[in-house]
Amino acid sequence: MNLTGLGRYWFLDGVAGWRAASHDGLEITSSDGKLVLDALPGSAKPLLDPTQQAAEFKCPTALCSDGHGHLFVVDAALNLVKRIDLARSTVTTLPAIGGKGAAPRELFEPRGIAVLPTGAIVISDTRNHHIKIFSPATYTLIQDWGANDTLGQPNQGSGRKMFRFPWAVAVGDCDSIYVVDRGNRRLQKIRADGTWQREVASKGLVSPTRLALGPGGLLAVVDTGTNSVAVMAPGTFQQLLDVENPLSVAVDTEARVYVGDGEGLMHIFVSEPNTPNSYKLAGSGITGFNGAIVDLVWDSPNGLFAIVAESSKGGQQRLWKIDPSGARVHTGTYITQALDSKIPNCQWHRVLLDASVPPSTSIQIDSFTAETPADPISHATTPGFNQWKLCVKAVNDNPDCLVQSGPGRYLWLRLTFNSNRSQSPELRSLKIFYPRLSYLQYLPAVYQEDETSRLFLDRFLSIFQSEFDDLDRQIDRVWQLFNPGSIPAKHLNWLASWLAVVVNPAWSENKLRRMLRKAYRAQCKRGTVKGLVRAIHDYVGVRAVVVEHFKLRRLPILSSGASFNGVKLWSRNFYKRLQLSVNSRIGDFQLVSDPAPDVEPLNWDANQFTVLFLANPYGSGNTEQQISQVVEREKPVHAQAVICPLLPRFRIGVQSSIGTDSVVGGISHLALNRLATLGYDSILGCSPAERKLRELGLTPRPVVGRSSLLL
């Protein structure tokens, strides 16, 4: 792409593509495609008040989220199911479910729970070796899977829909339920209607306990027997062996795998950038508590929730909330692919980053150039590769720097992100300009004769060139500031001041852009009736009618009978000029010379108009005030305006011009201090119930002899 005065450039971002040869310790955010350091879980806190936790729970063993602001928890000691409202921090015990026993609705040390999209609740009744499903709201038992003995009592089994110490359960697509059948060393997949589908995994599992489902059919299973987490996706199987004593697992919407261990640490695994469904350890986060993370669940709006067996409290199990982004990995590296200038021995110019660099963080930029794309590829990611040239280590936002490597057709950039453990630099886009168009070319040739001096002067002049390039770019794009459709939102008020558009703070950005687009046409009509009506609608949102008073005059028409048809011309008392025998008493006359007597009839109501608008009788004051402000700003300075709200009524002599100021509407009942003049703007009426009775000839107040009879 060509830019005036800037040559060409490569542009990399989340939309155009990052063209990454590798990135380690970094993630590309799904919302806006930024490059940031991997987030580590941390900053944990108890979910409920300690007193409330102690009162409601004895030994919570499993939890799940319904995705609508509720957590469901099973308590193995109480054999009950609890629902937590996250917004209100309230706990409710679900009725008709639980109580220790082997009856169909009873539970015995449950270890797993899940919620179907319908709201039905799936419970792993571990010591009874059954899986039970209860309907939403009424909590009717609708499914009960598992083996029974000859007496009908729950028993262990190894066949389909039979279990031996079932542990965790999870809900997948199409109402499929995954069951960790721990004693049988397998996972079963069963539809919610009871249709058995298949064994998901039976080989390689020794003692599976917990599982979590993710996007794209991802399945993560904790196997305490092999001290690992098995990650399965269609066609792939991987064992994560980087965690000692894994106990729980959760998967977020970005397919990141979180693993909780027996020491209170949270480990996060992310997918390899060039190998789908292949995971690597991104880092381990310190939660702040000391204990085993018994169960873990991901809730999209709120993050991670856990059940922790706290060592400081003798192994007591309590509920905690964990911030999935409570910390950041210390460092991460991003290396571009070979960027081709298509120019032999090209001297690359500079690198410009659109980035945020918080305090105590940095982004280091290194460069490497070569004439062929193949040679450095094998070395660019090799540890100890020492041909990278440091360009800058930036600690401020939006850094830029010169490419310090020598000429070469191909360029590689290495960006090293460093965090302060709590915050990460954010890279939104990257521009690499080429070839170098130095100001040195405008100096006499003598300044280029010495090679060492030439290179120094070339880089020195680039310092000023970078500043001037920004000015050139702004000048090249200045036309965008005068286009309401392309001007950035932060400059809209500036453009409005150029076009004399008064900005209403209540306008949205789109409304302001529309007002700017039609500002010229509005100025052409300013001071006219149409312009005033349009302005009232734009600024107040009211459709008004403007009546010019001169149009209401009744001018005399001379008939053939030489009479004026009873039309009165004008009264001498209108202007009360000083005239002997007419207006000569002191205090009754006025000394005026304008208008001239012969144009008095045409001067009545001249330059006057009325603004009529439909109004609510109970709240027209604020609207009337806003309209007055608009009218005073938009009307001709010599004109006089009368603001008249139209109430829903017809009043002879007051509001009675059909089609202009009369409105047929409902009754406005008496409102003290607002509508309080009986017979004018208020009436006393009966209630709607009484009005219906009267329509039927009845009354709520019977009167003997008039509306009722004694029989």
Image: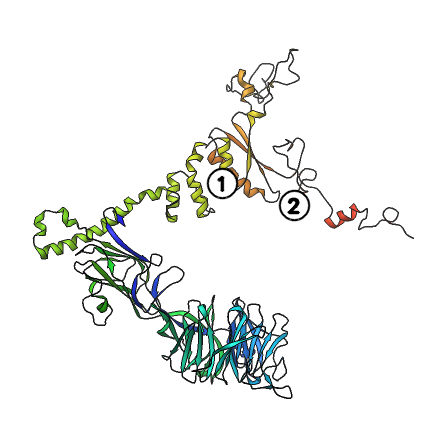
Q: Find the residue positioned furthest to the bottom.
A: 150
Is residue 518 something one can see in this rendering? Answer: yes
What is the three-letter code of the residue carrying label 2?
Answer: Leu
Look at the numbered disc 1 and give the secondary structure of its residue. helix
Name the residue carrying label 1.
538
Using the image, determine if residue 108 lies above or below residue 178: below
Mark 1 and mark 2 lie on one chain; the one further toward the N terminus is 1
SS type, badge 2: loop
**Which residue is under mark 2?**
672
Q: Amino acid at mark 1?
A: Asp
Residue 553 screen position, x and y as percent: 58, 23
Q: How many marks?
A: 2
- Residue at image position (44%, 85%) is 206
Relative to 155, say whether 688 is above or below: above
Give the CA separation, mark 1 to mark 2.
Answer: 33 Å
Front residue (pair 636, 103): 103
Residue at 27 percent of width and 58 percent of height: 399
Above or below, comparing residue 340 to residue 308 in the picture: above
Return the residue nearer the eye: 306 or 544.
306
